[in-house]
Image: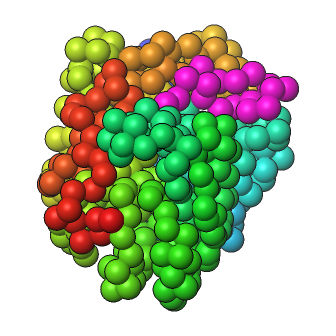
Amino acid sequence: MPTSRRTLLKNAAAAAAAYNLDWTRARAEAETVRLGVIYDLTGPFAAGGSVASSVGTQIAIDLVNEKGGVGGKYKIIPVAADSQSKPEVAINEAERLISRENIDLINGIFASSHAVPLAAKVEQQKKILWITTAVATAVFKDKNLHYVFRAQIHSDQYGQAFASFLTEHAKEKLGIEPKDVKIALIHEDGPYGSGVAGADEAYAKETGLQVVLNEGYSAAAPDLSVLVTKIKRSRADVISHAGYNPDITLFLRQARENGLQFKMLFGNGAGYSQLDKLRTSFGADIDNFCNIDPVPAQLLDPAKLAPGVGDLTKIMVERFKAKTGAIDVPPHCSMGFNQTWVLLNNVLPVAKEKYGGFDPEAVRKAALDVDIPAGGTIQGYGVKFFRPDTPLSGQNERSTPVVMQNAGEHISVVWPTNISTQQPVFPLPKSSVYAL
């Protein structure tokens, strides 16, 4: 029986409609942003802050996706990788994301020892590496990177904050001139620890502080008792320590066992920002220790930030506690969230609308357009990246750390003075097992 013209037209229309539906669905699936996310989810760095950073990153992704995705249109599909606290694994995972998963954008990186080789590798392939947490200045210094960006602070700023705090408070709190304050610098010997110690020494000399010891060690060292003995012999008033969770725990335990005493200990992020882990091991022994790092967003006064930023912090804190069961939200959560939020809200929409896509070239151009004033992010600082062909190209020129102090079960900001939440307890009170 011959098919009527009406039936032919009807069938053709149905086929066309089905084709258009399939094409629309395929296009919708294609209009997503696949984002590689690398953190140390296992190994010693995991508990040192990397997992907290990864949780912060995921919260940022979730919030953006709940509002429709980038620009309200393009859902983010995270493709996770575990660098296992090993540089060679981090490099292999980045290669897998780029070559096998066809990922153009990689976000994350906790350890500076991973960030340095990864930055070179990703730059060579002209893909985007968006660093959330690793701080070593060496990642960017004189590298003239074009495809690697970091809104996070860098290690030279730790030294600046350390020296500034001591010179401001030495006379009033210790009763001595800054030039008479004796400092011991101890650090794991990777890019992170060496970078912090180098900055500490440079700024200490610039301000006239006495550096009586500068000693590096392997983060995997099984014994740090010789280091403790060297500090005792140096008669240092103040210790600055850049380390990860396992070596910090080893050092503090052996320092206590060997009767090491000092007027103050300054941590420099990493393991010292995992207050819950240290408190589990040492209880009240770590009360009043100081720590230099980007601020946990919940410690800032929302009234001093851009409208809506305080509300964003509240959501981040609530979700982190719900996901982890934590009481205190560590700085690393804010780092993972803040840097990812800037990428998803201030860079990728511009890349698509102004430069035509989410490819590395479009993202690179959009990143260089970012101009967030102070107070415009949950960590208080603004964001503007140093231009190509400058000594720190790709680094945020507006990032700033704070000095925090362990105030019993919680954390307070004690420097800079204009955003401090309490006066510093300095030196350590006589009740401290480490008090000099």
Residue 341 in view: yes
Span highlighted in magenta in the image? 384-401
Q: Quadrant of residue 112?
A: bottom right
120 lies left or right of 228: right
Of 219 and 360, the residue lying toward us = 219
**Residue 167: x and y, percent?**
48, 36
The stretch drawn in magenta includes residue 388: yes
**Residue 193: x and y, percent?**
60, 60
259 lies left or right of 270: left
Where 268 sits versus 282, above or below? above
Of 146 and 330, the residue lying toward us = 330
Of 218 and 226, the residue lying toward us = 226
Residue at x 68%, y 15% (from the top left corner): 355
**Residue 346: x and y, percent?**
50, 20
**Residue 313: x and y, percent?**
26, 31
- Residue furthest bottom as drawn: 222
Residue at x 25%, y 46% (from the top left corner): 425
Question: Colour mode?
Answer: rainbow
